[in-house]
């Protein structure tokens, strides 16, 4: 349990007076101008800050803005945080945004660069794999006529040259001129 005594009250008043002194035209604020009211065992109370020159309380908006500016110092003075030290009608302070140690654009660039490197590597490896597969396969022969050209036939023990089936030859000894221009 948090022990709240007169020393703690004095520290709280001093912190509020310190916060008020940071506000322009309120540099004369003293600890005696901070009044605590309805202090309970659960450390619950409300407070006002008085203006010494006019003997009236300062507007709540002015006190709230002063506390909001110095909320972190008040929390640190009591070794508390925004969840354990609550000011009603004053929103909690936000932690300052953390700056990443590495800029975001470098991270995005690194990811895209890695993807490009992996893609290029995969393309190169797939090309090498296809070339190896192609070299391992026996050469394909498209036509059976090509197979015949490579073979030499032997008849009656005499090697014979195969006939050229593709182009064909015309024996002009058996052709007459009339046959070339035969009318229909």
Image: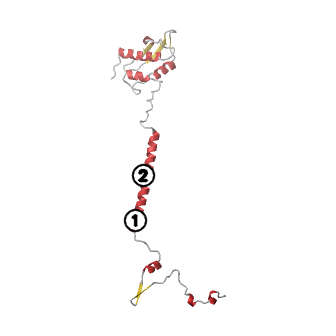
Q: Nearer the viewer, residue 25 or 181?
A: 181
Image quadrant assignment for residue 141:
bottom left
Q: Nearer the viewer, residue 116 or 44?
A: 116
Residue 126 position in % (x across, y down): 42, 59
Specify the label residue 51 is tagged with.
Answer: none
Specify the label residue 133 is tagged with.
Answer: 1
Residue that carries the numbered disc 2 in the rendered image: 118
Residue 84 position in % (x across, y down): 39, 26
Q: Against 165, is 60 above or below? A: above
Image quadrant assignment for residue 182:
bottom right
The first of marks 2 and 1 along the sequence is 2
Q: Nearer the viewer, residue 72 or 7?
A: 72
Query: Where is the N terminus found, in terms of image quarters?
Result: top left
Q: Nearer the viewer, residue 158 or 38?
A: 158
Look at 42% across and 15% down and name the residue there: 36
Look at 51% across and 18% down and name the residue there: 62
Residue 32 position in % (x across, y down): 43, 11
The local crowd at label 1, few if under 14, some if 14 to 19, many if 20 or more residues have their Cα within 10 Å, is few
Q: Residue furthest right?
A: 183
Query: Where is the C terminus found, in terms of image quarters?
Result: bottom right
Q: Is residue 135 left or right of residue 58?
A: left
Distance between mark 2 and mark 1 Cα atoms: 22 Å
Which element is circle 1 on?
helix
Q: Against 112, is 166 above or below? A: below
Residue 116 position in % (x across, y down): 45, 50
Q: Against 88, is 56 above or below? A: above
Q: Against 20, is 167 above or below? A: below
The local crowd at label 2, few if under 14, some if 14 to 19, many if 20 or more residues have their Cα within 10 Å, is few
């Amino acid at each position: 349990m948090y022990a709240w005594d007169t020393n703690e009250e004095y520290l709280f008043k001093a912190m509020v007076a310190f916060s008020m002194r940071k506000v322009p035209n309120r540099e004369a604020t003293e600890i005696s101008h901070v009044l605590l009211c309805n202090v309970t065992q659960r450390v619950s109370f409300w407070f006002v800050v008085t203006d010494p020159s006019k003997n009236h309380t300062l507007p709540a908006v002015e006190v709230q803005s002063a506390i909001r500016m110095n909320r972190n110092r008040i929390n640190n003075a009591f070794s508390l945080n925004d969840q354990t030290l609550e000011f009603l009608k004053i929103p909690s302070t936000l932690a300052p945004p953390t700056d990443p140690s590495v800029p975001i654009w470098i991270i995005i660039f690194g990811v895209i660069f890695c993807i490009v490197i992996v893609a290029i590597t995969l393309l190169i490896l797939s090309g090498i794999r296809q070339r190896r597969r192609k070299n391992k396969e026996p050469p394909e022969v498209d036509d059976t006529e090509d197979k015949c050209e490579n073979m030499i036939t032997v008849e009656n023990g005499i090697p014979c040259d195969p006939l050229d089936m593709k182009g064909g030859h015309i024996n002009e000894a058996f052709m007459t001129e009339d046959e070339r221009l035969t009318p229909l």
